Image: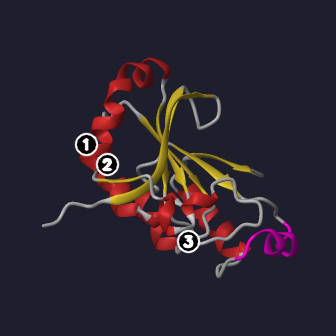
Amino acid sequence: MRETTAPFIGIGRHRMATDGVGVTTLVAFHGCPLRCRYCLNPQCLNGDGVWRTMTPGELYGEVEMDDLYFVATGGGICFGGGEPLLQTEFIRSFSDIMNPAWKLTLETSLNVPVASVQAVAPLASEWIVDIKDMDASVYRLIRVAAICLYVVIWNGWQVRIYRKRYWFACL
């Protein structure tokens, strides 16, 4: 069986108060279903934006040096990007090998099929949902996407079912 791999645009270590509780490391995936007019990470949209492709084990090797910070502060890994929910198999595999004391945060648009949300909802401690705007007409102006705002709202309810901490952010 071939091990799961995923493309990344970067890793940001020792982040505080931006990606969840405690000290976190932001792990940014390549790839996104959206084409937001004001995208903060446009490198996640084109083929030459891939910084590195890794297995869950290789990623763990990159971030395990911060175990003490994560455990002492209640922090951990924040998967973002791009859209992390395009890589649910990778996230599941990584969560199997990471220190269970780490928190797993997902920074997402929730603009994905509901099955993607359900696949990782039990694993994530926190969710940061980049919604931009709750007005559907404004949402369509800002984002160019196949999935509508109503799917995003439905997926937000799916997160709520698992009683996870989440907040909507206009990023």
Residue at 43% x, 25% y is 70
Q: Position of residue 132 (x, y in %)?
A: 78, 59
| In magenta segment, residue 43 | no
Give the quarter of the image for residue 69: top left
In three-dimensional space, the C-alpha distance between marks 1 and 2, rounded to whole angstroms, equals: 5 Å
Magenta-highlighted residues:
135-144
- The residue carrying mark 3 is 112
SS state under label 1: helix
Quadrant of the image occupied by residue 100: top left
Residue plotted at (82% across, 61% down): 133
Q: What amino acid is found at the position of numbered circle 1 in the picture?
A: Ile
Whole-percent x, y for residue 89 in the image: 34, 62
Q: Which residue is mark 2?
A: 94
Q: Is residue 105 above or below residue 36?
A: above
Front one among 59 and 119: 59
Query: Which picture quadrant has residue 60?
Result: top left
Amino acid beneath label 2:
Phe
